[in-house]
Amino acid sequence: MRPETPHEASRRRAALLGFALLALPTALAVFAPLVGKLTIGPMLAPPSLAHPFGTDDLGHDLLVLLAQGARVSFEVGGYATAIALILGTVLGLVAAFGGRLADDLVMRSAELTVTLPPLLLAIVMVALLGTGNLLTALALGIGSWPMVARVVRAAAYGLRGQPHVTAARALGVPRPMIALRHVLPAILPVALSLTGVLFSSAVLAEATLSFVGLTDHSTPGWGHIMAHAGPYLRDAWWMWLFPGALVVMTTAGVALLADAA
């Protein structure tokens, strides 16, 4: 067996650390329906066997709240990532194969979108369209597509001179068919390599929107739980520590896995 190189060992350690960090947030998201319904117990109870993450000022078990927040974070992060990947890949291919006018329109739109911070754009869209996990994901996905489009456009331009693409163009194959059959399969791994960055950014942005109250309050996210803990920073440290730790564990874990892939 070939000995492991230092680079491979570093990637393996990063992957193991990423899996370890994601274990708890993923478990909370997956088993959220099994955790139980929100019940009222003792107020501001510290972590114990009965309440592993303690309770808030209303007596709500934080285990249930954090599990619900995990579902929200993973759902919004997954949908936002999918929207950004699909929109960015399609527009990147359009820019590469749609001619000069299409290229200019896509790239100028990307530049216009990038001039606005993604979080600010998401705040504006959520304020206009309303709250809800899907709407939040849509806003975050629309704010993140330029990064994907630029990477896809650059990769697609690099393939335009390949022999199989040149042969297809010489045979009169339409540009959309060339992009779908001959270019998309080759650049798809490049686009998917951005999944970790997109997902981490979406989770962090969702927590921020939740913190400032611009998400659906019927399913509070981790940011909403941290915001609610404001008056109890000293008396109930668990109310802000655990949701904040879950946000860090999720974003760092996904980033490590993406770097190790």
Image (cartoon, rainbow, N blue to C red):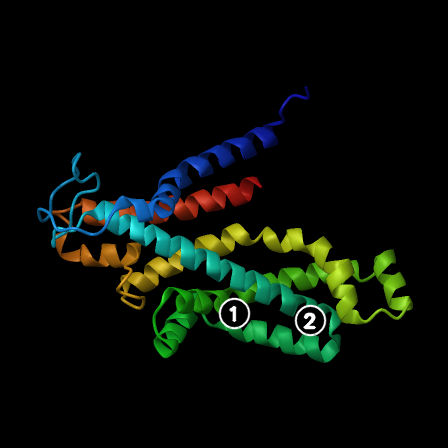
List the residue tagged with mark 2: 95
Quarter of the figure with the N terminus: top right
Compared with residue 103, is residue 233 higher up or lower down, i.e. above or below? above
Residues at marks 1 and 2 touching, judged by CB atoms closer than 8 Å: no
Q: Residue at the location (75% across, 59% down)?
A: 183
Q: Residue at the location (26% across, 65% down)?
A: 217
Q: Decide: few, some or many residues near mark 2? Use Cα within 10 Å; few <14, some 14-19, many ≥20.
A: many
Q: Residue at the location (17% across, 43% down)?
A: 54
Q: Quadrant of residue 135?
A: bottom left
Q: Identify the secondary structure beneath mark 1.
A: helix
Q: What kind of residue is marked 2?
A: Ala
Q: What kind of residue is marked 1?
A: Val
List the residue tagged with mark 1: 114
Judging depth in this view, the residue of 34 and 88 nearest the camera is 34
Q: Identify the secondary structure beneath mark 2.
A: helix
Disc marking residue 122: none
Q: Does the image show residue 158? A: no
Q: Earlier in the sequence, mark 1 or mark 2?
A: 2
Instruction: Give the left or right position of residue 126, taking residue 38 as reference.
Output: right
Quarter of the figure with the C terminus: top right
Compared with residue 157, is residue 236 higher up or lower down, i.e. above or below? above
